[in-house]
């Protein structure tokens, strides 16, 4: 098929040309001065995006790796942990905590819904003897395209001493995330989402309170140990060999992100969410997430049941070389997901909406051609006064 | 300074141009058919290099990560483990086992020496009630440039049921490694050594016996869990998002390695070792490793004590842009290490030897210019009937 593939996944995301070029540089000594400077620069960059004065460590790992780091460093075996799960990755966080010996109490929210802060507040209020040591929450749940209200959950926790641990792997830099202001103690993110670089780096952030708890407790950890990480960071190094080429990409990504501006990046993702949802609704398809909790990274669309989501994804790939994500576990074949995360243009979404209309028609689910497209066009027209595209960077 | 840096570290190593190009491709869906094929191809390639019929899993991690995977999957808390350490990475393996609850008994060998199989045999013979559940050994100890005799250690273990777990992070593909023939149960390696690609991938190999033990025991693990890894591998996937760009590099590296031939690659590394050691000796410097246990990946040179190793490394960097590695821990400032691993040419070593002679003279440690160089030249001349260089690939 002619032309590049449209990769509309909630990670990995398309790579900007200049990031690919940046990653093509030669290797350097990871114990030498050049890496030292690079490590400090990108660590500061990630810290600014987390909006934290706390610590940031960068691991050679996927996002799940730093979720494991969050557990192994800050939760002890036998600790009572409240895991709030709204989907696959919420369940994963709970499973990691169990694997590291925590006593996990799970609040399972029906998939497609956000967590209710009031329910969390009620559970926390009942914990009079403060047995709960940590609360695990997903920020953006990739499997359902639902965003939890992190500041409202922080308010629900009140002055309970449990650590507030947030998985923002697919949330960070696509949604507002004010780690310190929101009183998040530990947060985990990764490279292949809003950062526009390939998978392989995990970003763990934690504050002084979390670090003090880390120093008092033990769990099975070596690779993820933050004390070792901080000790090496002081020397401008990492405890084990860093994924150098991805660091080059991260450095370039952070330059691009600084140029665009974090607030603009977040607005752009909110715009993609609104455009996508309005177009999908206009063509008569259902949306899994309610508007007030809809993700800016990924939109989950309810497939017409007689078609099934998988046939739609297959047809989009075969006819247009557009990659959408299917549904996971109980949502398999029920939803398909349109990722609009990182280095995606409004033009990509416009084309995707148009292609989807064609595919639905070909699969025997008539949609009047142009219905969704027109809505997407209107969104772009309305928005064009604010956004100008130049050299692939949206300013 | 004009010209590319000479990176003569025991990892990361120089990158071939075609591997850089391969890594510059766009992202793909890691749950789609293209990644499926890529994953199977590189898994088979790594399996062939390990010379095993066992399983191979590829992790987004550094080499230390897969050492942790080896511990978390195959050793239970409370297990008695015999850790044979001949340097920094042997100590690290013991520390990881301790961190995961093993009762670690360490045989510490003076740095610069190899482990004595007879000593291991004596300890194993005394273990009449078979309390030792695993024996941890480094194949190539990067910190000292010493290679352990893995088949002799396997013989020392005899029919004792302890798992034989080998760290061959810097050993694999630079030295003979016949996993099945040598009765190694679990082996760990990584991308940034003889594989000529950047850091960020770890390769864990294990046999059926190790897998059976894994299924019976528990430890704190989620990210490294091999059961999950094997389950996903059957579907052509990895449990968490793989480091896709490094997979592209690995695929290209395995093509290059197949073209050169594993036996030729190993011979080439042995030739580098011999050339380097003979040149260093000729210029009157001492070698840490004894000839019968000298590494094919890295040569540790004893610096003249009045100079110190660090001054030599600094001068090599400042005057010639050649990166050598210093010594670690008790060998800090005592040795410097010349890496001759992966995509290094004999020409690079020739230039390095020549530069080292100049640097020693400038630092006031007179060496007759050309002494080491001449020996290196003689080695190359003698070897040229076997080796022809074409397009950067040594055939």
Image (tube, coloured by chain):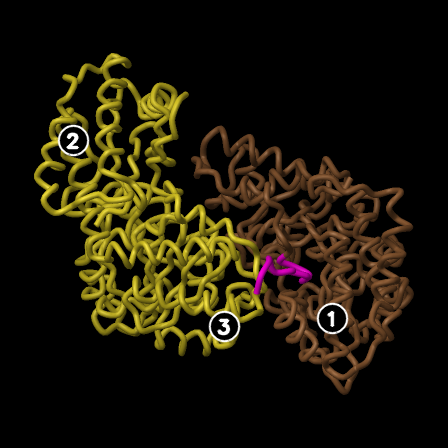
Chain colours: A yellow, B brown
- Rendered location of residue B161, percent (x, y): 80, 54
Q: Which chain is indicated by disc 3?
A: A
Which residue shows up at 53% across the image and 71% down it? A33
Which residue shows up at 39% across the image and 55% down it? A252
Judging depth in this view, the residue of B302 and A105 nearest the camera is B302
Q: Identify the secondary structure beneath mark 1.
A: loop
* Callout in the foreground (1, 3): 3
The region drawn magenta spans: B1-12
Callout 2–callout 3 Cβ contact below 8 Å:
no
User: Label 1, on which residue?
Assistant: B87
Ranked by sequence position, the earlier of labels 2 and 3 is 3
- Rendered location of residue B59, percent (x, y): 56, 49
Is residue A328 rendered to the left or right of residue B244? left
* Callout in the foreground (2, 3): 3
Is residue A295 rendered to the left or right of residue B150? left
Q: Which mark is residue A279?
A: 2
Which residue shows up at 32% across the image and 70% down it? A162
Q: Residue B354 carries which label?
A: none
User: Label 3, on which residue?
Assistant: A236
């Amino acid at each position: 098929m002619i032309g590049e593939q449209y990769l509309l996944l909630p990670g990995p995301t398309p790579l900007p040309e200049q990031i690919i070029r940046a990653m093509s540089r030669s290797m350097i000594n990871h114990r030498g001065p050049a890496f030292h400077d690079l490590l400090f620069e990108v660590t500061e960059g990630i810290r600014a995006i987390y909006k934290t004065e706390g610590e940031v460590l960068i691991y050679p790992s996927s996002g799940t790796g730093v979720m494991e780091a969050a557990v192994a460093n800050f939760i002890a075996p036998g600790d009572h942990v409240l895991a709030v799960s709204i989907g696959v990755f919420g369940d994963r966080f709970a499973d990691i905590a169990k694997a590291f010996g925590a006593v996990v109490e799970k609040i399972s929210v029906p998939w497609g819904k956000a967590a209710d802060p009031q329910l969390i507040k009620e559970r926390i209020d009942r914990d009079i003897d403060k047995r709960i040591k940590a609360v695990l929450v997903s920020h953006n749940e990739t499997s359902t395209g639902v965003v939890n209200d992190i500041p409202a959950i922080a308010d629900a926790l009140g002055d309970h001493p449990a650590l507030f641990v947030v998985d923002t792997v697919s949330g960070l830099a696509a949604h507002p995330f004010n780690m310190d202001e929101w009183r998040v103690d530990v947060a985990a993110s990764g490279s292949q989402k809003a950062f526009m670089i390939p998978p392989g780096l995990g970003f763990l952030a934690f504050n002084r309170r979390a670090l003090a708890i880390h120093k008092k407790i033990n769990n099975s950890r070596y690779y993820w140990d933050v004390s070792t990480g901080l000790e090496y960071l002081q020397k401008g190094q990492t405890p084990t060999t860093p994924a150098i080429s991805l660091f080059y990409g991260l450095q370039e990504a952070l330059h691009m992100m600084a140029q665009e501006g974090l607030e603009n990046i977040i607005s752009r993702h909110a715009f993609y969410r609104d455009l996508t949802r309005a177009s999908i609704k206009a063509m008569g398809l259902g949306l899994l997430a309610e508007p007030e909790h809809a993700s800016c990274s990924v939109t989950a669309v309810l497939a017409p049941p007689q078609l099934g989501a998988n046939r739609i994804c297959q047809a989009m790939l075969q006819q247009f070389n557009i990659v959408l994500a299917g549904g996971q576990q109980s949502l398999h074949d029920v939803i398909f997901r349109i990722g609009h995360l990182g280095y995606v243009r409004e033009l990509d979404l416009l084309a995707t909406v148009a292609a989807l209309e064609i595919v639905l028609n070909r699969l025997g689910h008539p949609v009047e051609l142009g219905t969704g497209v027109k809505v997407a066009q209107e969104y772009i027209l309305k928005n064009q006064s604010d956004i100008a595209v130049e050299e692939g960077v949206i300013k």
